[in-house]
Image (spheres, helix red, strand yellow):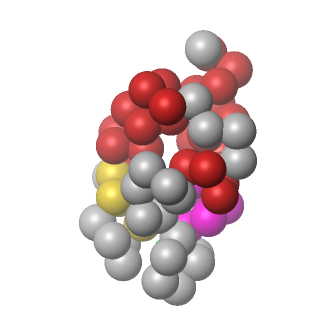
Amino acid sequence: MYVCLCNAISDKTLREVVRRYQPRSIQQLRQFVPVGKQCGKCIRAAREIMDSEMQHA
Ligand code: FES
């Protein structure tokens, strides 16, 4: 499913990016994938995915 519709970023993509680069914040995450750069509606969902991935790391 898409987390970020504006940039067509899926939850799968986000999980892979989080696992690979282990960003500590949304700002860092955005250095690797352009999540939330348009409307910003996806930021909350992106943060939740990031948090859940980091707990499993
Ligand atoms: Fe991600 Fe709009 S849905 S920036």
Q: Quadrant of the C terminus?
A: top right
Q: Residue at x 36, y 78 (%)?
A: 6
Where residue 50 appears, x then y in whole percent?
Answer: 61, 39
Q: Residue furthest top?
A: 57
Relative to 53, 4 lies left or right? left
Classify residue 33 as left or right of residue 45. Answer: left
Q: Quadrant of residue 42?
A: bottom right
Q: Position of residue 9 (x, y in %)?
A: 34, 58
Residue drawn at x 58%, y 76% is 41
Majority secondary structure of the magenta segment?
helix
- In this rendering, the answer to whether 9 lies above or below 54 is below
Q: What span is colored magenta in the figure? A: 42-46
Q: Which residue occupies 70% across, 39% down?
A: 24
Tell how many labels: 0
Q: Is residue 8 left or right of residue 30?
A: left
Q: Is residue 27 visible?
A: yes
Q: Residue furthest bottom?
A: 39
Q: Is residue 28 above or below residue 44?
A: above
Q: Is residue 3 visible?
A: no
Picture coordinates of residue 16, whole percent (x, y): 38, 32
Task: Find out whether residue 11 is within the magenta segment.
Answer: no
Residue 2 in the image: x percent, y percent? 35, 59
Q: Residue at x 53, y 71 (%)?
A: 36
